[in-house]
Image (tube, coloured by chain):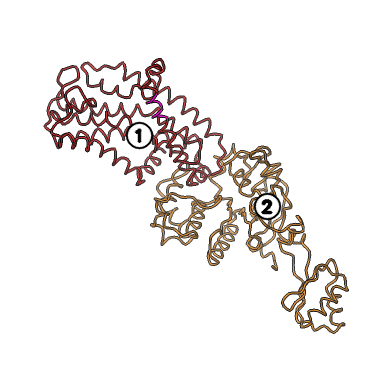
Chain colours: A orange, B red
Amino acid sequence: MTATATEPEMPLQDAPADLAIATKGLTKRLSGVAVVDGLDLAVPRGSVFGFLGPNGSGKTTTIRMLLGLIAPSAGEVRLLGQRLPSGGSAVLPDVGALVEGPAFYPWLSGRDNLARYDRVGRDSRRADRGARVDSALERVGLSAAAGKRYRAYSLGMRQRLGLAAALLRPRRLFVLDEPTNGMDPQGTREIRHLIRDLAAEGGTVFLSSHLLGEIEQVCTHAAIINLGRLLTQGPLHELQALGPVRLRVETDDVVGAAAVLQRLGLLDVAQRDGSVLAGLDGRVPEDVCRALVLDGIGVREFVQERPSLEDAFVSLTGEGFDVAR
Amino acid sequence: MWRAELGLLLRRVRIKALLGVLALVPIGVAVAVRVAGGGPDPGSGPRFLDQVSRNGVFAGLAALTVTVPFFLPLAVAVVAGDAVAGEANLGTLRYLLVRPYGRTRLLVAKGMAVIIFCLLAGLVVAVAGVLAGVALFPIGPVTTLSGTTLSLTAGIVRILGASLVVGASLLGLAAIGIFISTLTDAPVGAMAATAGVAVLSGVLDAVPPLHALHPWLLTHWWLSFGDLLRAPVLWTDILRNLGLQVVYIAVFASAAWARFSTKDVLA
């Protein structure tokens, strides 16, 4: 997994006014267990912020607290400067959310479902409801299926309709929980484009996922949590730098190359499919390459692999990125 | 806002079927009387049923008598029990709340929709009964329980009034149902528990040693609507019934609000 931050950098500032989401000591205990434990999140305005953690690490519980669906056991939440849950009625109209999968009325069409959600808000004007609904449907590519009952929608279509509900009006913040769940690669690509567009329009996107690769492709910032605790957060490139830099050498003499790397004291030397992998552990790659060539090893490819978020996670926890509990 | 909730309710096949069944019961009763060549002997059988073959409009009242103990409370249990738990079960509750749909506002809108459903259910039974009676039997001026005679129009107005009293007497049960509905994410459980409350009340009402309790039972005054067919109207029991419903509504609507306004929505 080679990763590059393709998005422009956003400065992380400490003043709460510059934060779209700020939590302090956010804690939720459910039947005695701290599902979320002292979380301090700082999501800069304008960022695409990846909220990462294995399944069961407390992501959805955190999102439910961010949106005022559940009350924190301790700590506080500020969304666009407003305290939740008390300021919910003021700030939530500016927030588009997708929480733990889409949910709609199976006996209504896609269009009628969106109209229902639009209608129950105090800010809903009837005159342009139809236009709002149609443009949201078009944006997620569901116009053709708008009249079909939700019951008949595929998993990917349901996910798209969920996103359309989040897009019903201009928003300053999007909280999207696993938005590409159940989507095919084409759909996933479209969603990625959509997220970039939302950020380009000036919105902040808070994106939770257990798929590290997905986050690395769209996010400018990320936070990693495990077992309800924040492990780290910040600009993506800083997080990636937490992982070990690895070396991959492709050669016709795998055994010889491995021996040289071992002699040089590189970490975790492993052979795989005509190439040798090793942890660089602070050594200068040019020196390693020279040593290989001087030993008569034919080097076809010599790559310094940038650490991925997964590497960062593993080096932070000492465990694999798997179901936490 | 309640219009949105009522619209959502009435578009469900389940609710249409429920109202359809409520309309079929009085039609079935009227047809049975016709086929049997007359109702039960005067003074026996369910109240008003003995009058149906002489004056068709009484089928509306007989229909109310027949559906009040079971069909109507069941229909109310289905709708009230589903009010909040149904949204939780679909997962739509979390999207309504982040829309944001204030919790109190949502509860009030659901309550209004359930109230209208209760009144509508009573009306559907009475109207279906009257129409079936008119189609199958002779009609004419309505003889009251006191022996006086009302014009046909005045009689029908009284019958429709009786159906609204029946609808209103279901409101206490509706409030209990909405309260139970805020306790769970399983609508079927909430519906069954609500229906259970109605059955329990009916059973307790039939146990003589508990007579001190009887005037406070939810179902005790449910048949008082018949007093509208007296001359002059005997209001005592009707008002006791409605007053008791108000008490139940106050208690359980408050409980529902207290519960729902602080509930962690995990569904």
Q: Secondary structure at mark 1?
A: helix
Instruction: Select label 1 or label 2 by which is in front.
Output: 2
Q: Position of residue A236 (x, y in %)?
A: 71, 59
Figure quadrant of residue A247: bottom right
Q: Is residue A269 left or right of residue B210?
A: right
Q: Amino acid at mark 1?
A: Ile
Q: Residue at x 15, y 27 (%)?
A: B152
- The answer to whether A325 is drawn above or below residue B255 in the figure is below
Q: Is residue B78 left or right of residue A247?
A: left
Question: What chain does badge 2 belong to?
Answer: A
Q: Is residue A132 magenta?
A: no
The reply to whether label 1 and label 2 mark residues of one chain is: no
Q: Which mark is residue B116?
A: 1
Q: Residues within 10 Å of mark 2 (few under 14, many from 20)?
A: some
Q: Position of residue A115 (x, y in %)?
A: 42, 49
Q: Residue at x 47, y 43 (%)?
A: B87
Residue carrying label 2: A324
Q: Which mark is residue B261?
A: none
Q: Residues within 10 Å of mark 1 (few under 14, many from 20)?
A: some
Q: Is residue A197 left or right of residue B177?
A: right
Q: Secondary structure at mark 2?
A: loop
Question: What chain does badge 1 belong to?
Answer: B
Q: Position of residue B142 (x, y in %)?
A: 15, 24
Magenta residues span B197-203
Q: Is residue B198 magenta?
A: yes
Figure quadrant of residue A267: bottom right
Task: Please tell me whether the stretch drawn in magenta is mainly helix, strand or loop.
Answer: helix
